[in-house]
Image (cartoon, helix red, strand yellow):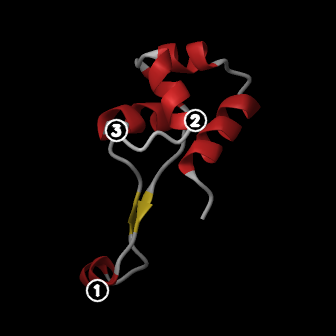
Amino acid sequence: MEPISDIVRAHRRVSGLSRVELAKIAGVGKTAVFDLEHGKSSIRYDILLKILHALNISMHFDSPLIRKQHGKAGVGGQESP
């Protein structure tokens, strides 16, 4: 699995956004984008969701329990911030 820091950095670059521009679009501080792209492990979940939402990235959670309860391969998507 690719680290989320690499995924966010790649999406930001392909989108042609600077860290400051992404932070403004996401409604977070520029330090949050920098920290996430550099693998800081203590980023707040709500901040993560805002950045992912701004880049149109969704998360997918999966486990045996989820598959059993939902009868499919997991539940996806992030909740909108």
Mark 2 or 3, nearer chain start: 2
Tell me which amino acid carries mark 3. Ser
Return the residue at label 3: 80
Residue 20 vertical position relative to residue 75 in the rendered view, above or below: above
Quadrant of the rendering where the C terminus is positioned: top left
Q: Please tell me which residue is depicted at 70% across the width and 39% down the height of the picture.
A: 10
**Secondary-structure class at tag 1:** helix
Return the residue at label 1: 68
Residue 62, position as x, y percentages in the image: 39, 72
Residue 43, position as x, y percentages in the image: 37, 37
Seen in the image, is 65 located left or right of residue 43?
left
Q: Residues within 10 Å of mark 3 (few under 14, many from 20)?
A: few
Return the residue at label 2: 37
Residue 69 vertical position relative to residue 50 in the rendered view, above or below: below
Q: Do the residues bearing badges 1 and 3 touch, measured as CB atoms within 8 Å?
A: no
**Secondary-structure class at tag 2:** helix
**Secondary-structure class at tag 3:** loop
Gap in Å between the C-alphas at discs 2 and 3?
21 Å
